Image (spheres, rainbow, N blue to C red):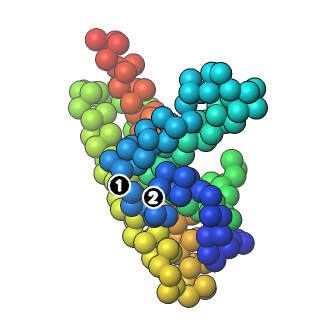
Amino acid sequence: MTCNTKITDTQNYFSLLGLPVSFDIDKKLLNQNYHELQKTVHPDKFANASDRERLLSVQKAAQINDALQTLKNPLQRSIYLLSLFGIELGENDTAVAPGFLMEQMELREALSRIEDRADPMAALDNILDDVKHRIKSAVSNLQALFQQILDEDIAEDEQHKLLAEAKAQILKMQFLNRLQEEAMNKEEDLANQF
């Protein structure tokens, strides 16, 4: 894994929205800064401007929207933080611990047979509660990891190790988010059956 040891990109989503680079964000400040920025670059303000100025306005508004969507979502925010260190997650980047993979397979198996249960909705609620708890735990782990990673005094080799741990945690969280989405779709399917 190659990565920059320090964040060098001065114009990133955090700075664009007036926030420090951190996993922990002030959501109220994020939304407030977002709305202030959107007021200044909204394409309606450039209706009588040149084609180039209108295009730049649309591009900047889109960038600000992307920044908001990325930073308000813990998974997307953590992936973005990794990218600031030069670490990109590929589509085929799915290496997770075998034990975790077995747990996922068991949960998916339980989800696929949910209709066979005496009370499918209660069983599904249990699965959803379990997955939500696991996601919450993953977010907490990422919060602690990024707090250490972004510490100014961290040694380079320790930072590399923590970045690898963060990447592994993000991959787990992606699995969990997909499982949660599948469970919520199953919940909708079950609700439509009754």
Where disc 1 sits, the SS reads: loop
Task: Give the total number of marks visible in the rendering.
Answer: 2
Instruction: Using a 10 Å C-alpha cutoff, classify the residue at mark 2 as few (fewer than 14 neighbours), some (14 to 19) or many (20 or more).
Output: some
Query: Looking at the image, which residue is at 47% across and 69% down?
Result: 146
User: Are the residues tagged 1 and 2 within 8 Å (C-beta)?
Assistant: yes
Pointer 1 or 2: first along the chain: 2
Q: Amino acid at mark 1?
A: Asp
- Left or right for 92, reference 136: right
Q: Amino acid at mark 2?
A: Leu
Q: Residue 19: which numbered mark, if any?
A: 2
- Residue lying furthest right: 52
Residue 128 position, x and y percent, is 32, 39
Toward which corner of the image does residue 79 lie, by quadrant?
Answer: bottom right
Residue 23 position, x and y percent, is 44, 61
Where disc 2 sits, the SS reads: loop
Residue in front for this viewpoint, 94 or 50? 50
Residue for badge 1 = 26
Instruction: Using a 10 Å C-alpha cutoff, classify the residue at mark 1 as few (fewer than 14 neighbours), some (14 to 19) or many (20 or more).
Output: few
Residue 149, placed above or below residue 41? below
